[in-house]
Image (tube, grey):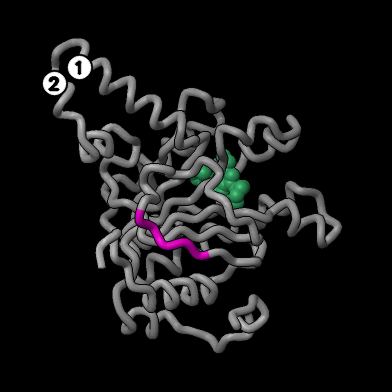
C-alpha cells in the first residue's frame, strides 16, 4: 500500500541519479502552497512564511537549472489572491522587489532567463518595475526560463484568447474554420513555451486552482504534503524520479 509516511521515508535521490535515470521534464510548473501554515506552525506572522517561500524559490530554481529543466513556471499570485487581507496583499506585492535586490544576481550568473505570465496592468508600479527589470536584465540568457505567474488566472487568460480569436474572425483576418487547438494555444500567454510535463503542488492540497487549465491537459501531477518553505532540492528530485517511472500515453495505448 502506498502511504505518505513511506513516501517521506524513501532513500535519497541525487541530481546525478535523476539525470541518468531518463528524461528530465522539459517544463515543470509549481503551485507553491503552505507558506502561511509554515509560519503559523512556528508562531510567526504569515509574512515570514512568504519571505521564507521566496528564498526557497531561488533554491528550487537553481536545482531545476542544474539538472537541465528548460522551463520552471511558479504560481506566485493568483487573480483570486486579491481577496486576502490588505496588509498581506501589500506584503506579497513587495516580494518581487526583494527578490530583485537579493536573489536575482545568482540566477543571472547561472544563465537563468526570467519571464512572466499574468495581468501586468493590475499590478502596482513598485511590483511591476522589478519584474520588468529582471526580465530585461536576463533577456539574453540562454539557460532555464524562470517563468513567474503573477496576478495570473487561467480562465481570464482563456477569455482573452477567445476575444482575440473572435476579433480576428470578425475583422476577417481569419476564417472561423481555422480555429483549432494549436491556434488557441498560440493566443495564450504561454504561446512560446511547451506545455508543462509535471505539475507539483505542495502542502497537501490537490486542486488546480485556476492554474494553466488548458496547458495541463496531459501533465503528470505530483502532490507533496510538505509546506513550500520545506520543499527542498531533494523533494524535487524525488518528484522527477517518480515522473520518470510513469508511462505517458497522451490518450493512446
Ligand atoms: C509568495 C511563495 C517570488 C509563494 C514564493 C507577487 C507566495 C514567495 C516572487 C517574484 C512570492 C515574482 C516575480 C518576479 C520575481 C520574484 C514572488 C509574489 C509572491 C507575489 F519577477 N516569490 N514571490 N511574487 N511569494
Q: Give the x, y percent position of residue 107.
A: 42, 58
SS state under label 1: helix
Label 2: how many Cα within 10 Å (few below 14, some 14–19, many 20+) = few
Q: Main secondary structure of the magenta part?
A: strand
Q: Which residues are magenta?
A: 218-222
Q: Badge 1: how crowded within 10 Å, few (<14), some, or many (20+)?
A: some
Q: Which residue is mark 2?
A: 175
Give the x, y percent position of residue 105: 45, 55
Horizontally, residue 170 falls left or right of residue 44, namely left
Distance, label 2 to label 1, CA atoms, is 6 Å
Asked if the beta carbon under badge 1 is closer than 8 A to the nearest atom of ligand 1, the reply is no
What percent of the width, then of the height, locates residue 124?
56, 26
The front one of 201 and 43 is: 201
Earlier-in-chain disc, 2 versus 1 = 1
- Look at mark 1 in the image and give the residue it sits on: 169
Q: Is residue 166 above or below residue 91?
A: above
The verdict on residue 176 being magenta is no
Quarter-wise, where is residue 43 in the image? bottom right
- Viewed as shown, does residue 248 lie left or right of 154? left
Q: Is residue 101 visible?
A: no
Residue 103: x percent and y percent?
A: 52, 54
Furthest-right residue in this view: 43
Q: Are the residues at dot 2 and dot 1 in contact (C-beta closer than 8 Å)?
A: yes
Q: Is residue 97 above or below residue 20?
A: above
- Relative depth, front residue between 72 and 204: 204
Residue 219 in the magenta stretch? The answer is yes
Amino acid at each position: 500500500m502506498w502511504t505518505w509516511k513511506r513516501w517521506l521515508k524513501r532513500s535519497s535521490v541525487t541530481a546525478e541519479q535523476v539525470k541518468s535515470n531518463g528524461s528530465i521534464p522539459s517544463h515543470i510548473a509549481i503551485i507553491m502552497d503552505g507558506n502561511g501554515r509554515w509560519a503559523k506552525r512556528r508562531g510567526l506572522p504569515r509574512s515570514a512564511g512568504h519571505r521564507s517561500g521566496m528564498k526557497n524559490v531561488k533554491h528550487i530554481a537553481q536545482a531545476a537549472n542544474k539538472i537541465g529543466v528548460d522551463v520552471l513556471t511558479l504560481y506566485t499570485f493568483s487573480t483570486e489572491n486579491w481577496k486576502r487581507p490588505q496588509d498581506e496583499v501589500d506584503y506579497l506585492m513587495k516580494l518581487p522587489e526583494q527578490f530583485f535586490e537579493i536573489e536575482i544576481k545568482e540566477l543571472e550568473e547561472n544563465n537563468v532567463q526570467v519571464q512572466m505570465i499574468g495581468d501586468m496592468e493590475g499590478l502596482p508600479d513598485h511590483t511591476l518595475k522589478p519584474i520588468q527589470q529582471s526580465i530585461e536584465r536576463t533577456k539574453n540568457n540562454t539557460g532555464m526560463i524562470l517563468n513567474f505567474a503573477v496576478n495570473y488566472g487561467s480562465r481570464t487568460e482563456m477569455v482573452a484568447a477567445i476575444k482575440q480569436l473572435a476579433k480576428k474572425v470578425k475583422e476577417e483576418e481569419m476564417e472561423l474554420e481555422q480555429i483549432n487547438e494549436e491556434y488557441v494555444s498560440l493566443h495564450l500567454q504561454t504561446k512560446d513555451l511547451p506545455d508543462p510535463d509535471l505539475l507539483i503542488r505542495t502542502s497537501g492540497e490537490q486542486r488546480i486552482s485556476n492554474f494553466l487549465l488548458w496547458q495541463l491537459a496531459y501533465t503528470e501531477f505530483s502532490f507533496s504534503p510538505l509546506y513550500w518553505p520545506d520543499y527542498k532540492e531533494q523533494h524535487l528530485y524525488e518528484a522527477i524520479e517518480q515522473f520518470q517511472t510513469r508511462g505517458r500515453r497522451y490518450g493512446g495505448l
